Amino acid sequence: MAKSVSKKDPADLFAGTPPAAGAAPAVRRPTEPVKVDVRRNAAEGTYTAQDIEVLEGLEPVRRRPGMYIGGTDERALHHLFAEVIDNCMDEALAGHATFIEVSFEPDGWLMVSDNGRGIPVDPHPKFPKKSALEVIMCMLHAGGKFDSKVYETSGGLHGVGISVVNALSERLEVEVARQGQLYRQVFSRGKPVSGLEALGKVNNRRGTRIRFKPDATIFPKPRFNPQRLFKMARAKAYLFAGVEIRWRCDASLLAGIEGVPTEETFHFAGGLKDYLANAVEGQTLVHPDLFTGQSGKPGQNGAVEWAIAWTADGDGFLTSYCNTIPTPEGGTHESGLRTALLRALKDHAERVGQGKRATGTTSDDVMNGAAAMLSVFVREPEFQGQTKDRLATAEAQRIVESAVKDQFDHWLAGNPNQANKLLDWVVERAEERLRRRQEKETARKTAVKKLRLPGKLADCTLTATEGSELFIVEGDSAGGSAKQARDRARQAILPLRGKILNVASATKDKLAQNQQLADLVQALGCGTGPSYRDEDLRYEKVIVMTDADVDGAHIASLLITFFYRQMPKLIEDGHLYLAVPPLYRLSHGAKTFYARDDKHKDEILAKEFRSNAKVEIGRFKGLGEMMPAQLKETTMDRKSRTLLRVMLLTDDRAETASAVERLMGTKAETRFAFIQERAEFASDEMLDV
């Protein structure tokens, strides 16, 4: 008789549809087979304990080098050198080493040594059969920098660096001079190939010497770059004035490489100030003095050193270090520097009554164009990743901000002229940033979006830049005639009311508030100043079309000055033109001619009409008086018009800038002198005009 299956019976696991409420319990007959997924069991059977690997010693480094040095490319290769020299720098900062030697030898060998205390060679308490040297070289997370007893600050925090170098080297040799004795041990690919050898007594020598050759089975290109090694070694010397770094490189390795000597000694008493002065040499600075300073002594917890210059013609840079370790991706210490500079500059603006101007400035405006070096020392810093590219220690931001803000306040107060120059320069950067945002983007209209263009602009229908033209016309009346005379497909019209602002003598505030210039910049769509983008210019030709009189010439001069000051590339690339409208209309019978000026009028009268002909001579008072058909025929039709291209006649930028400033700048006496010098060339006819 069949037996009922209880809820605890394993047979429940194979039951099908549960019985309905009140029904008898499900019964499985003894003869029913248990269904098994053979394919799943077979797959599971291929994954067993034998597939679980346990990597010992330094094998994880060799199997996955990217986890420790970021890859196997050239940057990762040179990280090996950084790990070794960083250990030497830690000894120097702790006050135990005064020099470091770097020697790049033939066949790819690199030697780095210091005259510090030397790696301990006595048996390790936890591993009595091994020396401390072997433990450090062959075991991950073994070192003397986990607390602050041996080093107050250091770059090596995880006990990983030198053992990784050992793991990724074809061969590595260590020599240690301690207490008058010399010791040596050799390793290959992370494993000792010799025991610790005592080589006898040595005089006048102490410290650690590491000589290694990268493993060609790990690195596709295992040869170091002498130029990169040279720069890395020199940079370390700038970071600590108390250390001397001696560089040597075999001459055979420098073939075709410029700027790298075979021997040199680095010792920079000025620290980062010397570093920055060398970096910005030859560049134009916003103000001549560097802002430099330090708080605390390098190597001590909380010490900060900085050097900053603002370059007028460069993009700038910010290079930072923590415990002499480069942090190319920045971090909290850089945030502290940016905040300190911005706060101090805004405080200065308030003191000199310029607070409103500086309201919209940001740290990006302050750092845009700044060339800055920053070095901070903190106990047990936190980095993102083993390669230490970014500092994450929150305390570093407070340390840097406090130190820099206080000294920058004093520097600004003690150098008012330079401080005001810097403030004007930063505010200009902020205004330019805001202009770029407002201009965003006057690209030509697309199928899905219409652009916000100036209300008075009559745009052309051509979507491509090539072949399109923008006529900047003097006055609404002339603008109305030009709109009727134009080729709607290719010619756009922007009327301007009267004389525009003279940008050579106007303040930045007036320039920013001028609506006519804002409309012009918006119509062109290419930005101004450093943000000018020729590829975004909406028209191939920009044509200034003004009346053929003195006022028209003055307006044209003001516009040319604007383009020269705000968009010089537009002139240099050949986009700016002057239209040549006629001043006179000469007609007799069926003959009609147009003359540009009095001389041209006399030439036409002599050539085209009889001497006794009663020629009707009409003088145009302005473009607005011309019929659209006349304006098209004389000034706008591509087949019959005359255009003058605006060009720079000299490559001497300083000479051109001086001429523009003399004729259009704030000093009226320079223009008066110009007029006096050329008074003899003036005529009554010119004065009548």
Image: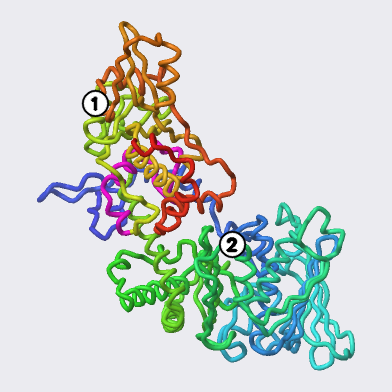
Residue at the location (51% across, 69% down)? 287
Q: Is residue 112 left or right of residue 495?
A: right
CA gap, disc 1 and disc 2:
53 Å
The quarter of the picture where the C terminus appears is: top left
536 in magenta: yes
Q: Nearer the viewer, residue 33 or 364?
A: 364
Q: Position of residue 685 (x, y in %)?
A: 38, 34
Q: Position of residue 28 (x, y in %)?
A: 27, 47
Q: Secondary structure at mark 1?
A: helix
Residue 283: give its label.
Answer: 2
Q: Is residue 488 visible?
A: no
Which residue position is annotated with label 1?
Answer: 625
Q: Position of residue 158 (x, y in %)?
A: 58, 76
| Segment colored magenta | 509-538
Residue 577: name its quadrant. top left
Residue at the location (59% across, 91% down)? 149
Residue 551: name its quadrant. top left
Identified by mark 2, the residue type is: Gln
